[in-house]
């Protein structure tokens, strides 16, 4: 008798487990929402990532004089340094 009962429980387990898990998840979700509340979105959260990036870039260059740049002749190296400096001779 026990083997028949366990075989029935084993075969019907997905049909019982899924609704129970769904109800537990739904209750937990709404309980957490009720306890935390729904905070109003701030101005930072409403702006997109690209808008925040542009704002940061504008703040960084606000106090700089953009007309003074380093001449290409004054730069020592035009390309990025090779990995571990193995492929370039040292400059003196």
Image (cartoon, rainbow, N blue to C red):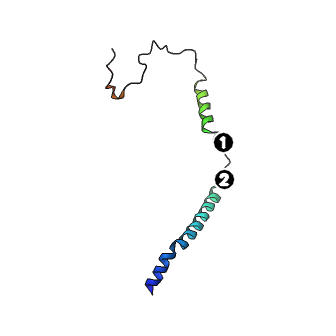
Q: Is residue 42 above or below residue 73?
A: below
- The residue tagged 1 is 46
Q: Is residue 88 above or below residue 49?
A: above
Residue 30: x and y in percent read 63, 61
Mark 2 vs 1: CB contact within 8 A: no
Residue 9: x and y in percent read 49, 78
Residue 40: x and y in percent read 68, 48
Q: Residue at x 44, y 85 (%)?
A: 2
Looking at the image, which residue sits at the far top?
A: 73
Residue 36: x and y in percent read 62, 55
Give the secondary structure at mark 2: loop
Q: Residue at x 63, y 58 (%)?
A: 33
Using the image, tell me which numbered label, if any, was put on residue 38.
2
Looking at the image, which residue sits at the far right?
A: 40
Q: Nearest the camera: 70 or 40? A: 70
Q: Residue at x 58, y 66 (%)?
A: 22
Query: In which quadrant is the N terminus drawn?
Result: bottom left
Q: Is residue 69 above or below residue 38?
A: above
């Amino acid at each position: 008798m026990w083997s028949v009962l366990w075989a029935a429980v084993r075969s019907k387990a997905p049909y019982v487990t899924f609704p129970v898990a769904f109800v537990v998840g739904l209750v937990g979700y709404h309980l957490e929402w009720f306890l935390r509340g729904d905070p109003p979105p701030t101005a930072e959260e409403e702006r997109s990532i690209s808008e925040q990036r542009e704002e940061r870039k504008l703040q960084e260059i606000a106090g700089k004089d953009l007309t003074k740049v380093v001449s290409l002749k004054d730069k020592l190296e035009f390309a990025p340094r090779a990995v571990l400096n193995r492929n370039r001779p040292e400059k003196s």
